[in-house]
Image (cartoon, grey):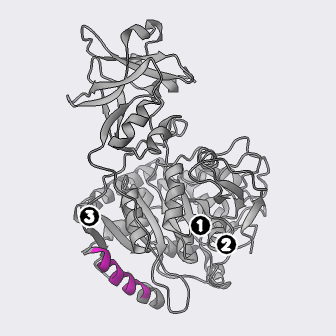
Amino acid sequence: MTVWITRVAPTEPRPGPLHGLTMAIKDNIDLYGVPTTAGDPRNTMPAATSAFVVDRLIEAGAVPLGKTNLDQYATGLVGTRSPYGAPHSVFSDLHISGGSSAGSAVAVASGEVDFALGTDTAGSGRVPAAFNGIVGIKPSKGLVSTTGVVPACRSLDCVTVFARTVDTARRAFEVMAAYDPADPYSRQLPQAAHKQGPQRIGVPDKPLGLDPLHEQAWSEALDQAAKLGDVVPVDITALLETADLLYSGPWLAERWLAFGDKLDDDPAVDPTVRAIVRKGAALTASETFAGFDRLAALKRRSEPLWNEIDALLLPVTETHPTLAEVAADPIGVNSRLGRFTNMVNLLDLCAIAFPGPARTDGLPFGVQLLAPAGHDHQIIDLAAVWCGEQPTTPPPADGVLLAVAGAHLTGQPLNNDLVLRGATLAFEARTASDYRMFVVPGPLPRPGLTRTTPPVVGLGIEVEVWRLPTEELGGFLSTIAPPLAIGPIELADGTEVLGFVCTADAVDPSQEITASGSWRNYLGTGSGT
C-alpha cells in the first residue's frame, strides 16, 4: 500500500501553537524543495516555495514528514486512481481508503503523523476521513488559502485537515485560516457567534437508500444526535440535486482548464481521470451559463433550510466499496460516493466529517455536519461534543471592541498579537468619512489614522473590529510603538470603539494613502512591501 510519494527528514520544530506536531501534505500542495506530482510522476520539478498554508503551519511549529498519495490531479473519491498504488482503509485491506486525499487520511489513521493536509472539491476531505475513522475539517471556501495548490476546480477547491481528534484538527485549522492577498479566491470571513442553548440539528426527512450496514449505523447516529440537540426533519432535495451538477457543466470545464493539457495518452495518466475530464473540453459557453443558472436556482431553493436549523447531519457516503467493486465500475462507484458531499462547495457551505457508530462488520461509518459559510467553529464545537471532547470556550461578550486597520488585520504580520490574547473578529466596518490614513515609520510598514480638521468628506477607511478580553487590554497596549496609540475611533454608523490612531504632527503628508481606502488595497499596489 503506497501512502507516501515522497518522504522528507524531520526538521527542528519552531516554537508555536503546533510545536512538534508532525504533518503529512497531500501531493498537490507545494512543499519547498520537493516535487509536487499531483499523482503524475512526470511532474518532477521541485517546488520553489511552500504553499501559503504550509508556511503558516511550519511557522506555528508543525513538522512535515512528506507528501502523500492521491487520486491523480485530485479527481476522484476512491483513492485508487494513482500510478503510485492504491491505499486501502486501515480497517480492511479489501476496502478502499477513499480519495482523493487517500494517503493523507491513511497516514493519520495509522498514526504515522499527527495531522495531514488534504483538499476537498467534491468531498475529498471527508470521504477518506469516513473510511478511516478519523476527523476531516472542510473549511468555508476562501478561509484557507489555495496559493501553492495544484487546482482541480479553482473556484471550489478547499485545503482541508485530517486528524484523529477534533481538538488536533481544530488547532491546525486555526493556524491555516488566514487571508491571503495573493489568492484571488481568499476572503475575509468573520465567524458566526457561538450559539447558546440547544442546537437545531437537521436530518433528512426521507430514507437515503444506504446499504444495510450503513443504514443500521445511521439509525444509531440519529439516536445520538437527539442527545445533543433538537432534531429537525428537513427536505434536502435541493442539496442532492446540486450534488449532481458537479461533474457536469462549468465545473467539469474548469477541471479541463486546470490540467487538461496534461491528459495525453501517456501511460502515466490514469485512464479514468482522462475519460472524465476530457468531456470538459467540449462544453460550450451556453452550457456553462446554463449550469450557473441552475446552481443559482438550487441555491435559492436551499436557503430557507438554514432558517430552520443550525447544522445539517448527513452520512458521508451511502456505502463503503471494496477495491474490487471500484475496479469493476470505477466511474459509477465514484459517482455514488459523492452523493452527500458534492454539493457542499457549490452551495458555499462548511463541513466537518467525524466517526459515527461503527458498522457491525467492524468498518467505520462516517457522519458529517454542514452549515453555511462562516459557521466553521459552530460545527467543529458540535462535532467535538459528539466525539466526547471539549468545545472551545465562547469569547466573552463583555470584551473591548478594538478597530485595527493595518498590521493587526487578519493574515497580516501582527494578527497573532490579537489571536494569542483570545481576541476574536467581531465584524468588519469603515471609519467615519473624515479619517485619513498615512504610512508611518517603524520596524515594519503600518498605517496611522488621523481625523481631519476641518472635516473632509471621504469614504472612510476599512477596518476590522476585534473583541479583546478586557483583562488583555493592558498587555496589548504595551506592544504599541509610537507614533501610534490606542484611542477612540468613530465608525461610519456612528459607533465609537477603541482603535489605532496617530497624532497629526507625526505623519508625513507625502505618505498619505487615504485614496487606497484600506491597508490591503495599498499593499496590493506593490508599495509598502
Instruction: Report whether 459 appears left or right of 249.
Output: left
Labels 2 & 3 near each other (Cβ < 8 A): no
For the point 48% across and 72% down, the residue is 354
From the viewer's side, name the closer residue of 379 and 150: 379
Q: Amino acid at mark 3?
A: Leu
The residue carrying pointer 1 sits among few (fewer than 14), some (14 to 19) or many (20 or more) residues within 10 Å by Cα, namely many
From the viewer's side, name the closer residue of 447 and 360: 447
Q: CA distance from mark 3 to mark 1?
A: 29 Å
Which badge, 2 or 3, is on the more N-terminal residue?
A: 2
Q: In the image, is residue 140 part of the stretch drawn in magenta?
A: no
Q: Which residue is mark 1?
A: 76
Instruction: Report whether 429 appears left or right of 368.
Output: left
Q: The residue tagged with tag 3: helix, strand or loop?
A: helix
Magenta stretch secondary structure, dominant: helix
Instruction: Report whether 114 appears left or right of 458.
Output: right
Q: Amino acid at mark 1?
A: Gly
Q: Which residue is mark 2?
A: 80
> How far across and how far down the image is residue 321, in percent?
57, 82
Write down the quadrant of residue 437 in the picture: top left
Q: The residue tagged with tag 2: helix, strand or loop?
A: loop
> How far across and how far down the image is residue 413, in percent?
53, 34
Labels 3 & 1 near each other (Cβ < 8 A): no
Question: In this rendering, is residue 498 above or below 244?
Answer: above
Q: CA distance from mark 2 to mark 3?
A: 35 Å
Magenta segment range?
A: 217-229
Write down the quadrant of residue 472 in the picture: top left
Give the quarter of the figure containing the N terminus.
bottom right
> How far across and how far down the image is residue 518, in percent?
41, 26
